[in-house]
Image: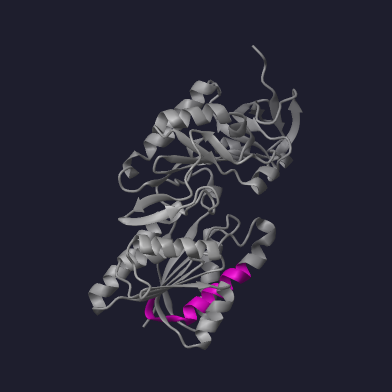
């Protein structure tokens, strides 16, 4: 039996792994014993030689290793990987039948570090963003097909992320079965959405916002029940209309949706038509959101509910200050457009912006807007995006539900 290579940590750097944090940074490594290839399983040991974890080695990444398990007696082989896939799929069983769009594997949270798998009906879409899972691509693909019964698997591995990991740019395409159609129709809370898994953002759809879309719909329904009319809403960075359609389904009188992508807006309009929502209730605006928010304020427009769900403003910790200014800008504009007792649903998907900082940014916007507002709750990804408690970095999506005081 071949002796596995070993990563020996610097003194004191074992503490995070003893707390079962799954990442080993390059700066924590004192030396490598053996010549492991990228993706090989290595034993991680403390400076004193204590076993800490089995991990996937990544020689070119700042994340030098991602831990598979902290149990020394476990063997990382095909049987182990198949069991992990089966466990991940079984954990989402309660969502089957409620929606056609489910995140089946969420990387470190499912102890398959660097692997993302989303399901859209009978189509699986993968992202292999770590060396360990990339080296086991064939085994994992076969396991996913067996666990779900979905014959079609399409890969959407992000080139920029793979480059940071020292991985070659993947040839996006079919891993199993057939080429996906141009549009896959899914159902979520009774609303139909078209998804382009080949060219759309992420894997084609923002599955992580399922619960927040349901919350927005409930707010629209409550508003109509209370006021006898539908609310007027503004959805910024609307993409293919996720929140817009949820609000229309809840009885919103008018929803104005803004995005800079003509292609996304075309899909959003098609989604509205797919659900029978007429043009008299849904308006789609191709524009820069920052500029459009200022223009709407100059026109004296106001809204009962505003959604701010921008793309990632901070790609890393180096961009936090710039991102904070951008978040402050859009939240300030949003608050100034909000009617008294109006609701603001504001989000950040930047991993470098933690929940506390995001709340402080929103509070600063409230102060500068010279309004009073309540925070009624925090919003986040659904149950198919579980947070591994020893890996807080997994909480990339943060949201706040604010209500402007009367």
* 338 falls in the magenta region: yes
Give the number of callouts: 0
Magenta region, residue range? 324-342
Image position of 20 with respect to 226: above or below: above
Main SS category, magenta section: helix
Residue 333 visible here: yes
Q: Quadrant of the C terminus?
A: bottom left
Q: Foreground: 265 or 61?
A: 265
Q: Is residue 243 left or right of residue 30?
A: left
Q: Is residue 31 left or right of residue 101?
A: right
Q: Position of residue 253 (x, y in %)?
A: 33, 75
Colour mode? one colour
Image position of 84 with respect to 358: above or below: above
* 196 falls in the magenta region: no
Q: Position of residue 21 (x, y in %)?
A: 57, 40
Q: Where on the picture, by quarter, is residue 67?
A: top right
Q: Foreground: 347 or 244?
A: 244
Q: Position of residue 61 (x, y in %)?
A: 71, 41
Q: Residue at x 67, y 48 (%)?
A: 160
Residue 112 visible here: no
Q: Quadrant of the N terminus?
A: top right
Q: Position of residue 131 (x, y in %)?
A: 64, 35
Image position of 83 with respect to 350: above or below: above
Q: Is residue 102 left or right of residue 167?
A: left
Q: Residue furthest top?
A: 1
Q: Foreground: 20 or 102?
A: 102
Q: Residue at x 38, y 60 (%)?
A: 213
């Amino acid at each position: 039996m071949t002796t596995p290579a070993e990563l020996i940590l610097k003194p004191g750097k074992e503490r995070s792994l003893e707390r079962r944090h799954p990442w080993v940074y390059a700066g924590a490594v004192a030396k490598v014993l053996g010549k492991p290839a990228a993706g090989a399983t290595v034993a991680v040991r403390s400076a004193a030689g204590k076993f800490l974890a089995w991990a996937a080695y990544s020689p070119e990444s700042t994340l030098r290793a991602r831990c598979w398990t902290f149990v020394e007696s476990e063997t990382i082989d095909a049987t182990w990987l198949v069991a992990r896939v089966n466990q991940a799929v079984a954990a989402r069983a309660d969502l089957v039948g409620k929606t056609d769009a489910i995140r089946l594997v969420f990387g470190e949270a499912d102890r398959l570090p660097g692997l993302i798998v989303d399901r859209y009906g009978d189509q699986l879409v993968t992202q292999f963003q770590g060396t360990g899972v990339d080296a086991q691509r064939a085994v994992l693909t076969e396991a996913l097909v067996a666990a779900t019964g979905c014959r079609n698997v399409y890969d959407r591995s992000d080139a920029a992320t793979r480059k940071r990991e020292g991985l070659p740019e993947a040839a996006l395409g079919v891993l199993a079965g057939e080429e996906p159609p141009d549009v896959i129709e899914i159902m979520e809370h009774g609303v139909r959405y078209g998804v382009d898994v080949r060219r759309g953002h992420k894997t084609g759809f923002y599955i992580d916002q399922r619960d927040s879309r349901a919350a927005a719909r409930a707010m629209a329904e409550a508003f109509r029940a209370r006021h006898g009319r539908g609310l007027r809403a503004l959805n910024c960075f609307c993409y293919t209309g996720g929140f817009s359609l949820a609000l229309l389904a809840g009885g919103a009188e008018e929803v104005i949706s803004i995005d800079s992508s003509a292609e996304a807006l075309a899909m959003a309009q098609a989604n509205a038509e797919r659900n029978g929502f007429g043009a008299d209730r849904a308006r789609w605006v191709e524009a820069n959101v920052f500029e459009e928010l200022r223009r709407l304020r100059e026109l004296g427009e106001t809204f009962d509910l505003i959604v701010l769900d921008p793309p990632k403003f901070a790609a890393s910790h180096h961009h936090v200050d710039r991102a904070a200014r951008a978040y402050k800008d859009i939240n300030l504009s949003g608050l100034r457009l909000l009617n008294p007792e109006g609701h603001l649903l504001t989000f950040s998907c930047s991993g470098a912006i933690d929940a506390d900082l995001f709340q402080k940014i929103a509070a600063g916007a409230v102060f500068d807007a010279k309004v009073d507002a309540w925070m009624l709750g925090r919003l986040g990804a659904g149950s198919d995006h579980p947070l591994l408690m020893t890996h807080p970095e997994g909480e990339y999506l943060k949201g706040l539900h604010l209500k402007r005081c009367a």
